[in-house]
Image: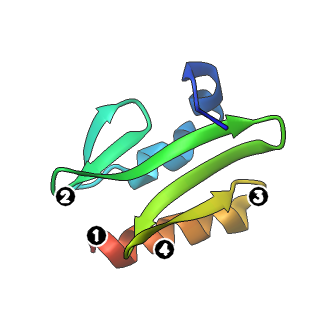
Amino acid sequence: MKHAGAAALGEVAGLIEQIRRPGLVEKKPGVFYRKGQAFLHFHEDPAGMFVDVKSGDGWLRLHLTDMAAWETCLAEVARLVG
C-alpha cells in the first residue's frame, strides 16, 4: 500500500482541511507530525483511500469509505491532539 499521491489526496481535501490544527505540522501534503513524530498520513490502494493515525504505541488504520470513517478519523485526531 503506497502513500497517497496528489490526485488521491485531492479526493480527501476536505478531510485534510479539517485535520489541520495547531499542534500538528504538515511536512508534506497529507503527512502530519506531532511533537516531531509521524502522526497521520494517507495511503491509496486499489481497495480505496486509507488513513493511518498514530494512537498509543501503534497505528489506527481507517478505510475512508464514507463520512462515518471521516468522522471517526476527526474524532481520533481531536482526542489525541485536543
Location of residue 33 in the rendering, given as x and y in whole percent from the top left corner = 27, 49
Amino acid type of disc 2? Gly
Give the labeled residue for mark 3.
66
* Mark 2: few/some/many CA within 10 Å (<14, 14-19, 20+): few
The disc, 2 or 3, on the residue closer to the chain's N-terminal end is 2
Marks 1 and 3 in Cβ contact (< 8 Å): no
Residue 32 horizontal side relative to residue 9, left or right: left
The disc, 4 or 2, on the residue closer to the chain's N-terminal end is 2
Give the labeled residue for mark 1.
81
Give the total number of marks visible in the rendering.
4
In terms of image quadrants, where is residue 69?
A: bottom right
Residue 35 horizontal side relative to residue 78, left or right: left
Location of residue 39 in the rendering, given as x and y in whole percent from the top left corner = 35, 55
Q: Residue 75 carries which label?
A: 4
Amino acid type of disc 4? Ala
The disc, 3 or 4, on the residue closer to the chain's N-terminal end is 3
The disc, 1 or 3, on the residue closer to the chain's N-terminal end is 3
Q: Residue 39 carries which label?
A: none
Query: For this rendering, which residue is in front, 33 or 10?
Result: 33
Amino acid type of disc 3? Asp
Residue 53 horizontal side relative to residue 68, left or right: left
Q: Residue at x 37, y 78 (%)?
A: 79
Q: Distance between the residues labelled 1 and 3?
A: 23 Å
Amino acid type of disc 1? Val
* Mark 1: few/some/many CA within 10 Å (<14, 14-19, 20+): few
Q: How far apart are marks 3 and 4 (CA)?
A: 15 Å
Location of residue 5 in the rendering, given as x and y in whole percent from the top left corner = 57, 23
Residue 49 horizontal side relative to residue 15, left or right: right
Q: Which mark is residue 23?
A: 2
Location of residue 72 in the rendering, given as x and y in whole percent from the top left corner = 59, 71
